[in-house]
Image (cartoon, helix red, strand yellow):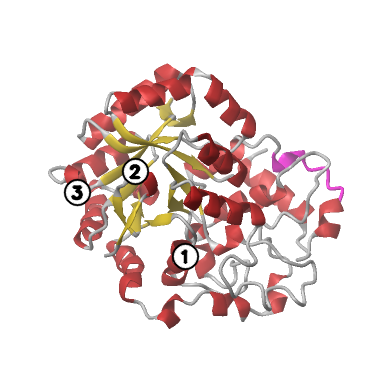
Amino acid sequence: MKYRRLGRTELMVSEIGLGAEWLERHTYEECKAVIDRAAGYGINILDCWMPEPNVRTNIGKAIAGNREKWIIQGHVGATWQNGQYTRTRDLEQCRIAFEDLLKRMQTDYIDLGMIHYVDLEKEWENILAGPYLTYVQELKAQGKIRHIGLSTHNPVIAKKAVQSGLIEMLLFSINPAFDMMPPTDDIETYFKEDYQEDLAGIDPSRAELYRLCEQNDVGVTVMKPFAGGRLFDAARSPFGVALTPVRCIHYCLTRPAVASVLCGYDLPEHVDEAVSYEHASDNEKDYASVLAGAPLHSYTGQCTYCGHCKPCPVEIDIAMVNKLYDLAVMQPEIPSSVREHYNNLEHRAGDCIACGGCETRCPFKVPVSVKMAQTAELFGD
């Protein structure tokens, strides 16, 4: 296992990490099997954003006696209320949830204390001006968290946080589908030359974020590296070709400032697949040739989250709605985190007026109005 410095935290983290969200649906024995397999390979960082009591308890029991070997990424503001996950900035609820995290993890500190899930500019502004940030800073002063981080899916928020100087590291969603932006509206030339070198072909705001993190020594840990598994299936991939875990991981690790890719594992064998990256050949890691060689016809009808459909007259973030829909249908049940992200959108699929303007701008001829109707039905708008 190789280790990378996580920005100015100075922590050395395994470049393959453990995103524990999938463990929420498993027994203690199953959780322990995954965690033991990860530890055996030298994985030393895990993210537990989930407030659900059983999964926290199971993880805590699984790492008991080896706490000092793990770098725990825990979230402030992910709470368990009335039997379900609720994101909040209410201080009392945040305190209850954070103390519960410490207790169930059988520890008196969290290495990376995350400002949990901020995707809206107004919310970031409220955090800067309110008591929630003061509470997070107090936790650090007390030694209950060692470093302050932020989790977000929005590059605008991430850039603001990095430039504020308040955070030492960032948890951000990275994979080729989320990063990609067509360099042209001409589908016949799409990807022929623009995905071959460095950051070419990537949404400029995301490319700028990665460089900004590098310049400010803010380390990045990665969530959603496989787009919920969508990238493994050619039929569901926006590229029309299947990538492997190794290629997805390599994509993430070649972004500036990235220190660790937090993969989700259901089984110990999934850990094996991810860690195979450490001895993979250059050919096995090569995502660019696979993407550049994808059949051009495959892009038609597939949302790539590129944003060319904007603007929307009712201000729906169409790319984000489509992304959450795709993540939701990858699982037997809608993950609680995906449902929460969707519910917190300012404008949801049910607000669509089916004007069709977005469809005239989409270079991939996505039937957006149909997708919005499907999403509204799925989430119960």
- The numbered mark, 1 or 3, whose residue comes first in the sequence reads 3
Of 223 and 201, nearer the camera is: 201
Residue annotated with mark 2: 9
* Label 2 SS: helix
Of 227 and 354, nearer the camera is: 227
Please report the bounds of the magenta region as a residue range: 348-356
Q: Residue at x 63, y 29 (%)?
A: 122
**Residue 375 higher or lower than 343, as above or below:** below
Q: Pointer 3: residues within 10 angstroms few (<14), some, or many (20+)?
A: few
Residue annotated with mark 3: 69
- The numbered mark, 3 or 2, whose residue comes first in the sequence reads 2
User: Alpha-carbon distance for marks 1 and 3?
Assistant: 26 Å
Check residue 352 for magenta coloring. yes
* Left or right for 189, reference 81: right
- Which quarter of the figure is the C terminus placed in? top right
Residue annotated with mark 1: 254
- Which quarter of the figure is the N terminus placed in? bottom left
* Label 3 SS: helix
